[in-house]
Image (cartoon, rainbow, N blue to C red):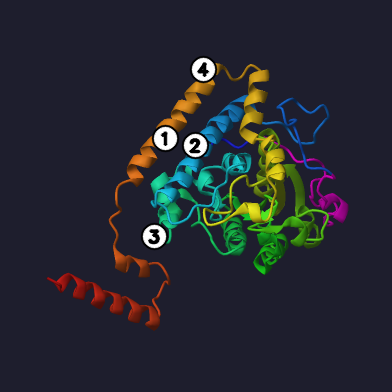
Amino acid sequence: MAGPRPKAPLPSPAGRSTAEGRPPSAEELLPSAEPVRFLTDSGAVVRRRSAYRAPDEALLRRAYRRMVVGRRFDAQATALTKQGRLAVYPSSHGQEACQIGAVLALNEDDWLFPTYRESMALVARGIDPVEVLALLRGNAHCGYDPERHHTAPQCTPLATQSVHAAGLAYAERRKGTGRVALACVGDGATSEGDFHEALNFAAVFKAPVVFLVQNNQYAISVPLDRQTAAPSLAHKGVGYGVRSERVDGNDPVAVLAVLGAAVEHARSGDGPFLVEACTYRLEAHTNADDPSRYRTEGEAARWRRRDPVARLEAHLRRRGLLTDEDVEACAAEAEEFASRLRERMNADPELVPLGMFDHVYGTPTPQLDEQRALLRTELEAEEALP
């Protein structure tokens, strides 16, 4: 389950309206010239002041444990595709700081709007991993209860969940619940119309929503320089009046600090916040992809040296917050988690074919009823065979 959000005040003026009530200027909305960074690639503390407050020790230790378990889950899910237990799996190896940081920045009753790549985040949010993988296994439109977990179904179309997040966040504001929505999108999604409509709506109506853009450098095989001519993806928020920031997405400390501040900004009534996390997808887009066709091994190797898990481990060791015994315990927990998942996924699921028509529309269309009736007839005919 999500832990307590970090207390991370925004840099002044942080996109807030002035005392006179004027909207923030473009300069006040602009992201940092360089991505916010707390740690070097080796885990040492960057020797410069940051406007963001570093997360506390307990949160960093919790993040490390969840990142280790999350990476092992990701590796196991990738292996399940090779065994035929999953139809497809989009790995988030290399993006652990973003996946876990997004969850830890939220309260349990805040809303998360994931893409198809956020399986690790859903597991960290406390959702049963078998239920998480139901979509990728082909068993259900969504294997978990979105209302119970305050987590929308994983979204395959690019950017459509950003509109949903903005709308739900606005509804929460109207109801006065104090809840925040966080929408995960990839770099490719920032070229979609839904993304821009969501930003504009959220800004105009001051919806308490955070847009987390995980810029992993490629939208499948399309590199970032073919995606935008803007100085950064974070700059896309400025034109809509959305406070924006860039962060080193492989620096777990920085990700927690910036996302914590972004969530507090939204929760306090100051409107939406856009965070671009600069990271890298180390594995293929999915098991059906061949990344060697569009990127070099040397490029991937350079990003492996910026491993977010190793980076946080080194940092915690330097501070005396992590021992060999702690590392071994986390690794053992991760292996046990993967073993249970593997065992459960080896069992054939009990499927209800007619269930595929449920929850498609609130009121089924005539075409959907016709298709359901056709499938029912075929199933009955199959059962009647000797």
For label 1, the residue is 337
- If you read the primary sequence from the N terminus, does the residue marked by circle 4 or circle 3 appear first? 3
User: For residue 325, which numbered disc appears in the image?
Assistant: 4
Would residue 142 be seen by someone viewing this image from the given angle?
yes
Residue 293: image x %, image y %?
Answer: 65, 56
- If you read the primary sequence from the N terminus, does the residue marked by circle 1 or circle 3 appear first? 3
Between 151 and 371, the residue placed more toward the observer is: 371
How far apart, in angstroms, are the residues tagged by discs 2 and 4? 18 Å
> Secondary structure under badge 1?
helix
Q: Label 3 crowding class (10 Å Cα cut-off): few <14, some 14-19, many 20+?
A: some
> Secondary structure under badge 4?
helix
For label 3, the residue is 140
How far apart, in angstroms, are the residues tagged by discs 1 and 4? 18 Å
Residue 139 left/right relative to 302? left
Residue 118 located within the stretch drawn in magenta: no
The type of residue carrying mark 3 is: Ala
For label 2, the residue is 72
Residue 82 left/right relative to 195? left
The type of residue carrying mark 2 is: Arg
The type of residue carrying mark 4 is: Glu
Q: Give the range drawn in magenta.
A: 7-33
Between 345 and 131, the residue placed more toward the observer is: 345
Residue 291 left/right relative to 371? right
The type of residue carrying mark 1 is: Phe
Would residue 125 be seen by someone viewing this image from the given angle?
no
How far apart, in angstroms, are the residues tagged by discs 4 and 3? 40 Å
Residue 377: image x %, image y %?
Answer: 24, 78
Between 261 and 80, the residue placed more toward the observer is: 80
Q: Label 1 crowding class (10 Å Cα cut-off): few <14, some 14-19, many 20+?
A: some
Q: Which residue is drawn at 72% across and 57% down?
A: 223
Badge 2 vs badge 1, beta-carbon distance below 8 Å:
yes
